Image (spheres, grey):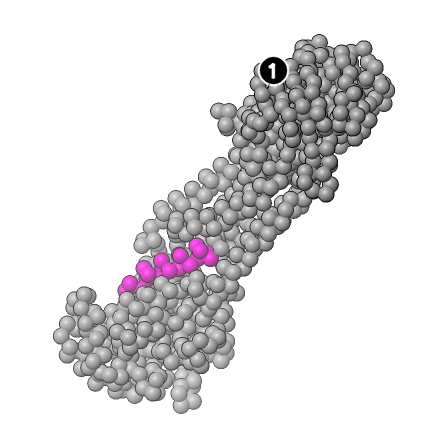
């Protein structure tokens, strides 16, 4: 009679669920702290006294958002449209927005 | 046992119904999976990178003190360093020398800095990203223009590891003399200060003392640095809102398609089923399975593919969005990390509404009288 | 045994297209017999069959199935009675297109939770009896009218009902097939089943197998 449709689907679903579980296992078994890449980055941050990830190299305040001064980030207008695409991904740091309030 | 057999039987018929409308269902399934794939990819990526930032920047300076003048960053006089050193609770104060250099050859910005170790004059250590962008390797010479227009040549003695690119891709390390010569920085000034305190719990107090002592100085504590990256890729930010809106729109279209009523063929089929003895609840069970088959498969497949995309293919599809207008972009692998809570949220936001949209609009058709098929 | 007392059925009550399909019908259908409702189209035969077969409720009047009154049973009970007691063969067959003949025959039993294997066996046996075993896996659109008719009969029998109801069964069949059809009904009658047919085909009404003919015209018995 061949494989029944519902059986075929349930087997496929089970396989997907297994894969799903494998993903979770894979992610949780990986020890973040002993990962070679992470360790290399930590060493450099410590040795060089770095303050930011090198993600957006378009401008100074996107390259070092943690170090940015208030005026640069809000250069033209507090609600001005962002110049760079990365501005949509990384908002101005919180400590700038609350500057002078503590 | 009977209940299971009933589910299998109804599922058989549901699957054959889905296969009978192959074109439409394949289109729905593809869009659904693509949507889940996109959302899950974004989810995995942002979670992993935030986790990485939190871990890596734990070793950032405890307090960085900048000086502001006329609303802009100004150079930090070394005299301030002495004043801060005198504050009780401060164990060490160091001047940091760093700045930006725009390279017109490739149109990229480099971050120039003096590290703690002293380098021989005329030599430079560069990040792997610069090496890639300029095709420069160990032993090569690079030429720069100083602030006064002169040429300054540097020999590349080392290239920083590829693994550390996420923090070092655009770095250029030179010794203090060379940096001052390149930028024209006078001896009495540094870029900013890095302060280490004896008792970490006193960080806020000491930062407040520094602000009091030096009114034109701005202290930034490590906590603030970490929180900057916690807010990265926030759902409230520009692109994320667009993404979310797009996803919501796609699902609204699904629901509209399903809710705009069943086709004449579907109605006829339900009429026949009612006539041969299926109850309203049986019809709705079939509709449930119809929704569940498509949405469960799309969800699982989309999430699995997203995981592979982000952690095994380095999020290649996001490349253009992440690179933005940068010329120099770090190449990095992210450590696999999954937030169960986020995945569960994605499940409830995608699967549940779809199943509801499969069942609810069919309610009216499912309650049709069994003899309706004979009256048409 | 089925008993109807003062049955009345009105469609679209209170609206401009209000229509009385059946007016004051009272009758008793005997068990194990072949009963035929004879009348022209529009006489209310189909409506009467649907009421007898628990597919529609009367507007007025009462119905008994054996000793149980089923006039105002909730849908759930009505459906399970109908599923277990009646097998309906529609005038236009009403088979589900796109799936096999076998699948169609098993369809009424799917929600009952019987295993697929047992259903395949049952349907297979029925197909053999009716001579269409080799067409079991074919899609119903590819079957001839006579073959579809037999699939419809097999479907009506899958839950082993005591009563078979057929609405104008020979409407799409030629004489030869009609007579074959009547032969099948003889088998069912011999098996102890009650058969109720609506037809205005003389081949059916005049057949020796028929135990009783009830004439109906304009919603009333003659």
Q: Is residue B372 visible?
A: yes
Question: Vertically, is B197 above or below C202?
Answer: below
Q: Residue at (64%, 34%) from the top-left corner?
A: B369
Left or right of B89, for residue B41: right
Q: Residue at (71%, 9%) from the top-left corner?
A: C190
Total marks drawn?
1
Q: x and y percent of residue B82 in the render?
A: 18, 82
The quadrant of the image that shows the C terminus of chain C is top right
Q: Main secondary structure of the magenta part?
A: helix
The quadrant of the image that shows the N terminus of chain C is top right
Q: Depth check: C221 or B294 in front?
A: C221
Q: x and y percent of residue B363 in the render?
A: 58, 41
Question: Vertically, is A57 above or below B335?
Answer: below
Magenta stretch containing residue B48, yes or no?
A: yes
Q: x and y percent of residue B234 in the render?
A: 41, 63
Q: x and y percent of residue B230 in the render?
A: 36, 63
Which residue position holds label 1? C66
The residue sitting at the left extreme is: B88
Q: Quadrant of residue B281?
A: top right
Magenta stretch containing residue B276, yes or no?
A: no
Q: Quadrant of residue B364?
A: top right
Q: Is residue B116 visible?
A: no
Q: Residue at (69%, 42%) from the top-left corner?
A: C15
Which region shows up in magenta? B41-59
Question: Vertically, is C12 above or below C132?
Answer: below
| Disc 1 crowd, CA 10 A, few/some/many (<14, 14-19, 20+) | few
Question: Vertically, is C147 above or below B87?
Answer: above
Q: Residue at (51%, 48%) from the top-left corner?
A: B353
Q: Depth check: C30 or A39 in front?
A: C30
């Amino acid at each position: 009679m061949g494989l029944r449709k519902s059986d075929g689907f349930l087997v496929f679903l089970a396989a997907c669920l297994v894969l799903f579980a494998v993903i979770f296992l894979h992610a949780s078994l990986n020890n973040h702290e002993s990962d070679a890449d992470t360790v290399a980055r930590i060493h450099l941050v410590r040795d060089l006294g770095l303050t930011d990830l090198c993600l957006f190299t378009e401008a100074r305040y996107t390259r070092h958002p943690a170090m940015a001064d208030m005026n640069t980030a809000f250069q033209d207008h507090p609600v001005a449209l962002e110049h760079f695409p990365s501005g949509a991904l990384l908002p101005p740091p919180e400590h700038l927005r609350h500057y002078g309030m503590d | 046992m009977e209940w299971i057999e009933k589910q299998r039987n109804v599922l058989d018929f549901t699957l054959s119904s889905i296969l009978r409308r192959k074109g439409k269902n394949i289109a729905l399934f593809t869009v659904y999976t693509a949507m889940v794939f996109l959302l899950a990819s974004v989810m995995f990526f942002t979670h992993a990178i935030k986790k990485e930032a939190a871990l890596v920047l734990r070793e950032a300076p405890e307090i960085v003190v900048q000086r502001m003048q006329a609303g802009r960053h100004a150079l930090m006089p070394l005299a301030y360093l002495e004043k801060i050193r005198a504050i009780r609770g401060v164990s060490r104060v160091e001047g940091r020398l760093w700045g930006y250099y725009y390279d017109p050859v490739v149109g990229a910005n480099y971050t120039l800095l003096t590290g703690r170790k002293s380098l021989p004059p005329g030599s430079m250590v560069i990040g792997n990203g610069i090496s890639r962008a300029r095709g420069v390797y160990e032993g090569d010479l690079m030429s720069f223009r100083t602030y006064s227009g002169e040429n300054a040549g540097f020999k590349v003695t080392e290239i920083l590891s590829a693994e550390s690119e996420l923090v070092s891709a655009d770095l250029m390390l030179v010794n203090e003399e060379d940096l001052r010569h390149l930028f024209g920085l006078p001896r009495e000034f540094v870029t900013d200060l890095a302060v280490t305190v004896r008792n970490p719990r006193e960080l806020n107090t000491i930062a407040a003392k520094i602000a009091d002592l030096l009114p034109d100085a701005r202290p930034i504590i490590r906590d603030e640095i970490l929180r900057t990256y916690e807010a990265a890729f926030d759902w409230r930010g520009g692109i994320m809102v667009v993404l979310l809106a797009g996803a919501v729109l796609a699902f609204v279209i699904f629901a509209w398609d399903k809710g705009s009523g069943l086709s004449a063929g579907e109605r006829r089929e339900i009429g026949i089923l009612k006539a041969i003895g299926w109850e309203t609840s049986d019809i709705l069970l079939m509709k449930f399975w119809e929704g569940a088959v498509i949405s469960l498969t799309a969800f699982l497949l989309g999430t699995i593919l997203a995981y592979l995309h982000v952690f095994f293919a380095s999020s290649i599809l996001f490349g253009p969005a992440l690179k933005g207008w940068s010329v120099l972009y770090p190449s990095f692998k992210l450590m696999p990390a999954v937030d169960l809570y986020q995945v569960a949220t994605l499940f409830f936001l995608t699967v549940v509404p779809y199943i509801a949209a499969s069942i609810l609009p069919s309610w009216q058709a499912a309650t049709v009288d069994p003899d309706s098929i004979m009256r048409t | 045994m089925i008993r109807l007392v003062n049955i009345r059925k009105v469609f679209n009550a209170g609206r401009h297209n209000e229509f009385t399909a059946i007016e004051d019908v009272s009758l008793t259908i005997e068990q194990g017999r072949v009963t035929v409702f004879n009348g022209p189209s529009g006489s209310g035969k189909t409506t009467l069959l649907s009421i007898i077969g628990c597919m529609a409720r009367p507007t007025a009047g009462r119905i008994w199935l054996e000793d149980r009154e089923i006039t105002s049973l909730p849908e759930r009970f009505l459906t399970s009675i109908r599923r277990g007691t009646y097998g309906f063969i529609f005038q236009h067959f009403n088979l589900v297109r796109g799936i096999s003949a076998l699948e169609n025959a098993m369809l009424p039993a799917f929600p009952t939770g019987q295993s697929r294997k047992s259903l395949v066996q049952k349907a297979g046996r029925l197909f053999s009896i009716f001579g269409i075993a080799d067409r079991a896996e074919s899609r119903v659109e590819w079957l001839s009218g006579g073959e579809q008719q037999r699939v419809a009969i097999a479907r009506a029998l899958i839950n082993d009902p005591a009563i078979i109801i057929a609405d104008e069964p020979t409407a799409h069949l030629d004489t030869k097939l009609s007579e074959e059809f009547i032969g099948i009904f003889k088998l069912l009658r011999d098996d102890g089943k009650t058969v109720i047919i609506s037809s205005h085909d003389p081949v059916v009404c005049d057949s020796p197998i028929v135990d009783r003919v009830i004439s109906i015209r304009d919603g009333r018995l003659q």
